[in-house]
Amino acid sequence: MALRDTLEAVLREYDSAKLTRFVGNPLAAFIRNEAVLDVERAAGPAARGLSFAGSAGAGSWAETPWLAAFDPLVTDGASRGYYVIYLFHVSDSIVHLSLNQGTSAVRDEFGATARQVLSERAAFIRLRLPDFVLRLSTTHVALESTAPLSGDYAAGHALGLTYSLGNLPDEQTLADDLRSALQAYRALTFRGGLDTQPEKEVGGEFEQPQSLTELRQLRLHCLIERSLIAANAAKQHHGSRCQACDVDLGELYGPIGRGYIEAHHLRPISTLEEGVIVRYDVAAEFAALCPNCHRMIHRMEDPSNLYKLRALLH
């Protein structure tokens, strides 16, 4: 289905579906499966590197069903981090396209003040993305007031757009809006995410950046390398033997070192730009290195030159 048809179907059918049994319900299955694919297709090239999911509830109907896009550099789900999400206010036939925040982790940490924290972080996101506020101009959203999680989503909303069932834009406009939201999402990560101290030093093995752009490039590089997706993919493709020194840490340290390896992103840090789409093409863009070699390659003038690192060892 087209994205417009998908949003319309959820808005039209959800209230009546909630009166029926949740388990095995076709609309709940649609939101978890086909609707997710429709959002991903509408995102087009902007979907690369992201994961998509949808939910109508866990075991019972949710007051606020959703469809979301997650950047694995930031989060693996809706409970933490920040992400782009469609939030359905079904009783008012409204859907919000929202750059929002994970609420569960914040509530676990801050308890009764969680919504204040989420609201303050949302305001901070808007300050970090002033160039997107005009395009994604909805800065406050209304959701089911009786549902605790829905209220948290309302507090966590930073920017986006709101559509009503009776005035849904055409397919191209919806797709353009979604891509703008995803662009803002990637820009937020490049600019420091929710970190309020962008000037702090990053990584002792790196030469300290001299400009804000260099700092942002370095932070993004660190996020990419620390991603579990990168580490697991590099290990699966390259194995756990260091591609520079040929050491297998399991042979040195026994069980505690078995299978351990670090992913090194071979793309030069200086080429990372705002909005960059990370390709987890481990054969072309990642190497598997032991911790020592990983630190040493970052001390080289060109940390993307794995061949030169190998030459230093022989």
Image (tube, rainbow, N blue to C red):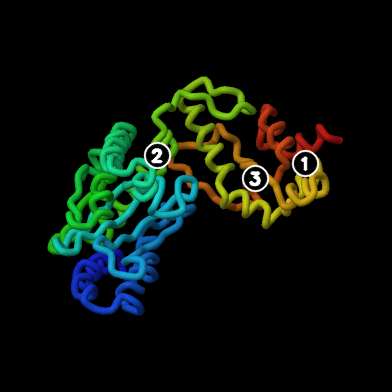
Query: Is 27 left, or right, of 301 in this rendering?
Result: left
Instruction: Tell me where residue 148 sits by quadrant.
Output: bottom left
- Specify the amino acid type for callout 2: Ala
- Specify the amino acid type for callout 3: Ala
> What residue did someone put label 1 on?
244
Tag 3 near tag 1, CB within 8 Å: no
Instruction: Tell me where residue 122 sits by quadrant.
Output: top left
x, y (%) of residue 6? 28, 68
SS for tag 3?
A: strand
Residue 306 appears in view: yes
The Cα–Cα distance between marks 3 and 1, rounded to whole angstroms, is: 12 Å
SS for tag 2?
A: helix
The Cα–Cα distance between marks 3 and 2, rounded to whole angstroms, is: 24 Å
x, y (%) of residue 246? 81, 45
SS for tag 1?
A: loop
Q: Which residue is drawn at 61% across and 26% down?
A: 204
> What residue did someone put label 3 on?
263
Query: Is 171 left, or right, of 38 in this rendering?
Result: left
Indicate whether 88 appears above or below 272: below
Q: Which residue lies furthest to the top in this view?
A: 210
Query: Is 159 left, or right, of 212 in this rendering?
Result: left
> What residue did someone put label 2 on?
187
Q: Which residue lies furthest to the right in this view?
A: 314
